[in-house]
Image (cartoon, rainbow, N blue to C red):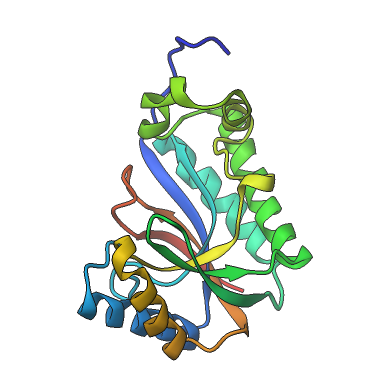
Amino acid sequence: MPEKVVLPVADVSIGVALLPSAEFREKVAEASLAIAARCENRNIIDEATFPAHVSLCLAGVGRESVSELTGAIGEFATSIKGLELRVQSLRESGRGFLFLALDNTQQLRDVADGVIEICASVHTMNPHYRPHLVRGWGTLSESRRQLLVRYGTYKVQSEWNPHISVASVSADHLADARKVAANLITLPSDVRVESIQLLDIGHDNEKWEVLSSWDV
């Protein structure tokens, strides 16, 4: 695809996410809020605004595609039975991001692939791209562009790393934040998935508006 190209900008930035059991979400929220009480936490996880979750797909769609996406994911949700998350360890990035790493089990991979294929199908028929991707198109690698054109997102295959966010703090507070989380979240844990949700996450990932939710 050429460097200069006009891409249709999404009306809605959607997310599809798995929500673990309420009990586990409460533990993650407790840890995230405890970290926020000690230092600035740029990614507070709580039940009121951003619950603990596993993102399966983040993409942009035209407003007219939301109903089609809702129907397809709702139908797919009926096939998800007894899904569990194997939460293995607490990990961190050099940028102060603290998260729970999950085993990428075949069961989880199958669910993620199913959701990605649904989103890709909707994207193929009516392609739209999240605004920040349109703005940064020229900085993306060719492989990521190809994934975006095909799926509407590049976080698929080896680019997708299943995790549950806990906090985002400055590097000098990361060790302390990790200790707080480690004292509150029991690891490793097998955690039941409670629901799958279709969300409007905002173009800047600034909100969590549930468009539809299905128990699994």
The answer to whether residue 29 of the structure is visible from this angle is yes
* Residue extending furthest toward the front: 172
Identify whether 135 is placed above or below 194: above
Residue at 69% in and 52% down: 114
Residue 44 seen in this snapshot = no
Residue closer to the observer: 59 or 122: 59
Q: Quadrant of the N terminus?
A: top right
User: Which residue is painted at 63% across and 28% down in the image?
Assistant: 143
Q: Nearer the viewer, residue 210 or 60?
A: 60
In the rendered image, the residue lying farthest to the right is 106
- Image coordinates for residue 94, horizontal then vertical, percent: 43, 56
Q: Quadrant of residue 139?
A: top left
Tell whether 100 sits left or right of 109.
left
Residue sitting at 57 percent across and 52 percent down?
71
Above or below residue 47? Residue 110 is above
Q: Position of residue 12 (x, y in %)?
A: 37, 41
Residue 165 location, x and y as percent?
44, 66
Residue 126, x across and y down, in percent: 53, 28
**From the image, which quarter does the C terminus lie in?**
bottom right
Along the line of sight, the residue nearer the viewer: 189 or 25 = 189
* The quarter of the displayed image where residue 81 is located: bottom right
